[in-house]
Image (cartoon, coloured by chain):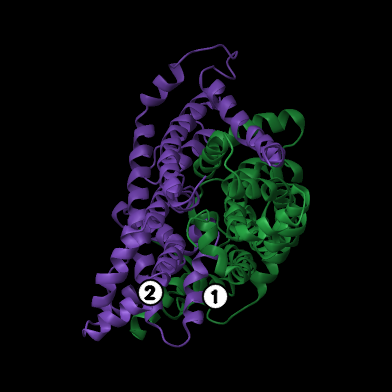
Chain colours: A green, B purple
Amino acid sequence: MYVGLLLASLFAFWPIMIMAFEGADIDLGPLFSGKGISYVSGVPYYSGGFFPTWANYRDALAWGDFPKLVLNSTSIALLSIAIALAAGIPAGYVLARSKLKGMGAIGFLLLALRTVSPFAIVLPLYLLYVNVGLFDTTLGMSLAYLVIDVPVVVWMLSGFFSEVPGTVYEAAESAGATERQIFWRIAVPSVAVGIAATAIFAFILIWNEFLMASLLTGAATKTVSVGVWSGVGEGFGGLKSANWDAINAAGALAFFPAFAMILVVRRYLAKGFSLATAS
Amino acid sequence: MDRTAYLLILPLVAILAAVEVYPLAESVYLSLTNYGGGGAFVGLANFATLFSQSSFWTAISTSVLYSSGSAALSTAIGILAAYLLTQVRKGRGYFEAIFLMPLAAAPIVAGVVWAPAAVWDDIDTFWHYILHQPFFNILSYHLYFPIMILSDSWEWAPMMMLVALSILASIPKSVYEASEAFGASRWKTFTSVGLPAILNSPVFHFMIVIRFIDAMRAFEIPFAWSGWLAYSQPGAPTDTLSLYLFKLLLNPETDVIPLPLISAAALVLLAVTMAAALVLFRLMRGLRKI
């Protein structure tokens, strides 16, 4: 039983641990084969040092301006989530509470947004952005990321709103509250925790997103996940051009904040990933 | 309520129009013209060109194989992890936190940590220097393709686990107690009570479809691997549809970026995902009122 648990934990944990260790240049390789990348019939094998060094973490923090990448990712994510919440809170409320004509169409569009290939969205956006000067800007990237956070935000929030017992709304109505008051004074405060969890969940998705960011950002707004890869160098040079330790160090630095946030919202993760269909 | 409701949903409709309807309409338009060559309407010529390229069909079959493999494997690992967690008496929270770790890793990081030089490096060291076997040939398709699927499953199995756990939690305790009272082992109880509950759950079906669609869009892990293997041209065995499109965009075989071709391919991908969204929509309707 516990053997199974330990094996499963190792499976989940080991690659992360290797990444953090390689970042610190800890490796058993040098015991056998010496340091550096060696090629055995064209296949690269990397072998680090035996004793830990913080140099790569220090490098990664300086290299590619890691703090700036973090700032970019964070400001893009926060702006995008703010817009998504501004539209998603009222929309989630309506989806949870009323059955209007056309809601089915909106629900379908939201699901389609969740499943659409970024390419069908990104190419037209790219052409548009280059024309109107939104390419490589925080605003442009935040708007593009609405593709990712809007469906999640709306479904999660509508899930939270529908958990508020109907009797609460009925009591407010019979006490003479207006629709506006019910929304602001009753509905929104009672899902406040849900809104926070939704925002954090959306933040993790955006923090980890790679494809759209690598196509729509340039030097000015490069995000963390793109930055991690930039140690590999240009194009598809294989491992020869990779600054292997620094990639791992940057990967580890990007991982830990996301893991902390995962732990904070762990109770709501199932809801987020299943678009609130799982309780 | 009705007028207010329409007002409240208006911002969402505006956003959907701007970031979904407009770009998709533009994609359709691009795919029907020869953008960059005068912009004339060419009908379905781009699609004909696309369908005549063998690299496109390679990408389709790679994506389907990758997605089926990843959906199946992440489901299996997720259910197994959920079973293990339900058996823990003490410290379940810690194990659950460890199991959730891959979810926090960016997919590009999953491409990095499962790379030949990272995880396999140590296995290889052990295999070669201690067991005195020849090095793995990581360039072999039969080795790296399953590893790509495994990386993807590693990343997303916790998601399946979470949903499986929420389904298991909804089974009344008395059912388990009854089963144990009849002397059934824990594994037997799981296979006769928990497992069917998970596999028959509409929520879980919904998740499997989502997992398959997400894997159809998979980009980062195949991208990282085609980096490790130095496959720069479209049509490589690592190329899923998204990666194929990416390479057409950044490493075109000619000097002209084949935007209409890419739009056409993106539309094919769109048609696939729309069909999948329709399936999801029907599943979701069964789960909750929309």
User: Foreground: A79 or B260?
Assistant: A79
Q: Residue furthest front?
A: A174
A21 relative to B273 in the view: left or right: right
Within 10 Å of disc 1 (Cα), the crowding (few <14, some 14-19, many 20+) is many
Query: Where does label 1 land, which residue?
Result: A21
Can you tell which mark lies on residue B172? 2
Do marks 2 and 1 share a subunit? no
At which x and y percent is residue A223?
A: 67, 53
B157 relative to A158 in the view: left or right: left
Label 2 or label 1, whichever lies nearer to me, is: 2
Q: Secondary structure at mark 2?
A: loop
Report the label total: 2
Locate residue B203: give its quadrant.
bottom left
Within 10 Å of disc 2 (Cα), the crowding (few <14, some 14-19, many 20+) is few
B240 relative to A59 in the view: left or right: left
Locate residue B128: give its quadrant.
bottom left
Q: What amino acid is labelled 1 in the image?
A: Phe
Q: Residue at x 46, y 62 (%)?
A: B159
Q: Residue at x 39, y 33 (%)?
A: B56
Q: Residue furthest bottom?
A: B90
Picture layout, residue B123 above or below residue B203? below
Does residue A275 appear in this view?
yes
